[in-house]
Amino acid sequence: MKIGFDGMGGDHGPIETVKGAVDALSLVASNIVIYGDEVKIKNELNKYKYEQSRIEVVHTTEVIENDDKPVKAIKSKDDSSMVVGLKALRKGEIDAFVSAGNTGALLAGGLLKVGRIKGISRPALCTIYPTMVGASVLVDAGANAECKSRNLIEFAYMGSMYAEKVIGIKQPKVALVNIGAEETKGTPLYIETHQLLKETDLNFVGNVEGRDVPSGNVDVIVADGFTGNIILKLTEGVALQLVAGLKTQIMKNMIGKIGGMILKNNLSDFKKMLDYTEYGGAPLLGLNGLVVKAHGSSNAKAFMNAIKYAQIGLDSHLVEEIKKKVASFPKPEMKEEQESEV
Amino acid sequence: MKIGFDGMGGDHGPIETVKGAVDALSLVASNIVIYGDEVKIKNELNKYKYEQSRIEVVHTTEVIENDDKPVKAIKSKDDSSMVVGLKALRKGEIDAFVSAGNTGALLAGGLLKVGRIKGISRPALCTIYPTMVGASVLVDAGANAECKSRNLIEFAYMGSMYAEKVIGIKQPKVALVNIGAEETKGTPLYIETHQLLKETDLNFVGNVEGRDVPSGNVDVIVADGFTGNIILKLTEGVALQLVAGLKTQIMKNMIGKIGGMILKNNLSDFKKMLDYTEYGGAPLLGLNGLVVKAHGSSNAKAFMNAIKYAQIGLDSHLVEEIKKKVASFPKPEMKEEQESEV
């Protein structure tokens, strides 16, 4: 198998992407195909010792930037690392594609170049949400700002498959984000979705309030992409602020510094629990191929782990399993086939 | 002036409410009127030494419970501490009303018994959002799950007034919660609201993403009540989990325990920064009177501070200032007068 990799995506360019790819070789069975500027990428590759037959470089001349308009960029930058990679996935030249590029463009490109699974109305960004007691899954983390209940039901199914197949949670507990535990809480969308989720064969455990999202009590957190994106980024923001505040308190006097030095190892374990680079990638589930979005600010370690999770997704036949599952979706909500709005 | 206080609201009943009222006397110029079961409240009052002429008890026979349906409870429990208090506010017998009871009931009661400010379509819960660098204001924190752009514009104005008058921030920086910095990001509601906010005379600084909400870089965080409620509770949840995780790391070995003991004072300052009881209350702005919602799990200190903030609201003429400001609202969005849906 081959995992395609966007060598030009992310804030740090080929320096971090190439190191991530080289480091991933020992973790994955697949070979890696890097798309991007051949000279720059080979320059980076030459810094490392690795099994050369396992990394192939495909030269591309364009790059989709973070401030490019998604659909326009996908349509006009035909020789960009992202578009060439996505087309290769469609053609079966590679088995998965990992990119830290423009999220909107990756979604648009996924829809236009790879296509949706038949029966899925909207692909969703399915991310691992780290908690103190293990990993939960958050879906949608930002691909679809506005959703209908049908979309949320699909997200719940896909998130549940991901938790089961990739993280290895049996009978994942699926919960709907909401502003109260009662099924009458929330907007009409959330009230309707709650009722529909009750009728599915998912292990639906009800609503989860903001306070309980980070507890790890539920395995799959279902939200529209607007809410999901805010949950993901706010969690990161609060953690960053608290760690900074803790540091300030420790450094503010001599006693604190001494205590901090004694605690150094214990605190580094604490910081490790908050480290997003441990997971590094979030698949765009619902596409007819495995497309993994890596964090824009990924370092080599995050890229390595994004490639590792792509391999786990391939080994567990995630996309095929979702295709099979679509066939068992409850029918009533599936009547009107909605087109994605990209 | 008199501040009315729901003696039966909150998870801990009169034990904490009464202590909070007694402790508040030294902080506020107003006298306090406690509504509730006279026997229970006087039993608690008898435990303390205080200036007896400054606390009056008004006997009520009913209590609105947390699982009561809001509108039904307000309409049927006519002799509840909440309804009697809100009616007293309407009649001018008291100048503000503080309650830790059922949020939905307090909103419904505020609308039905106190009424809205003319020109405001929906009252909103305006809460202080503590950050490491001071207090921001979050509005709406959960009163209106579903909103229109007009509601959000009103929230922005009311939140800005609150930040200025009560917290003392000059020219508060107002930001719209969103999933990206660009004005084209988010749902149609948020895209429209962004454009309308640009046209106001508020100090609108653009969108704020989840990651920056806790940074304290903006003073007023505007969101629909669904998103706002999730932001508030998720922040609390992440902070709780991190503090628990930190404690686990410190307590896991002898070295950690020694470091923790040395750091004790510094860590208690850290915990203090996260303490919601420092603020304790959130006004329901947009009502034709000052109604303050205290946290359901308030202890005496939180009640004391909720009463203190009610006094600051009175001293700064918050409700009157909002009434004046409504007159200067941009007109185009105000044409269709929407009725609240309670």
Image (spheres, coloured by chain):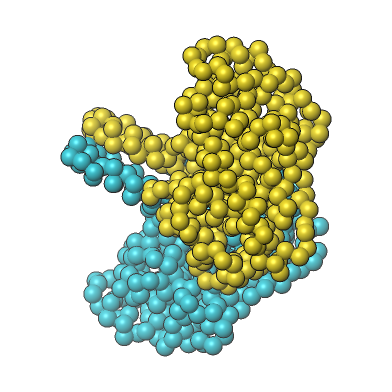
Chain colours: A cyan, B yellow
Residue appearing at x 73%, y 26% in the figure:
B80
Q: Position of residue A241 (x, y in %)?
A: 38, 50
- Taking A127 as reference, is B336 left or right? right
Q: Is residue A313 visible?
A: no
Image quarter hosting the C terminus of chain A: bottom right
Viewer-proximal residue among A238 and B18: B18
Location of residue B252 with respect to A68 vertically, above or below: above
Nearest the eye: A205 or A88: A205
Quarter of the view holding residue B317? top right
The answer to whether B163 appears left or right of A240 in the picture is: right
Report x, y in % for residue B4.
Answer: 63, 30
Q: Residue at x 39, y 66 (%)?
A: A297
Viewer-side residue, B144 vs B245: B144
Q: Residue at x 72, y 47 (%)?
A: B116
Q: How many marks?
A: 0
Looking at the image, can residue B103 be seen?
A: yes
Q: Position of residue B117 (x, y in %)?
A: 70, 50
Decide: is B54 above or below B342: above
Query: What residue is shown at x 55% (from left), y 63% (from top)?
Result: B202
**Residue A318, position as x, y percentages in the image:** 57, 60
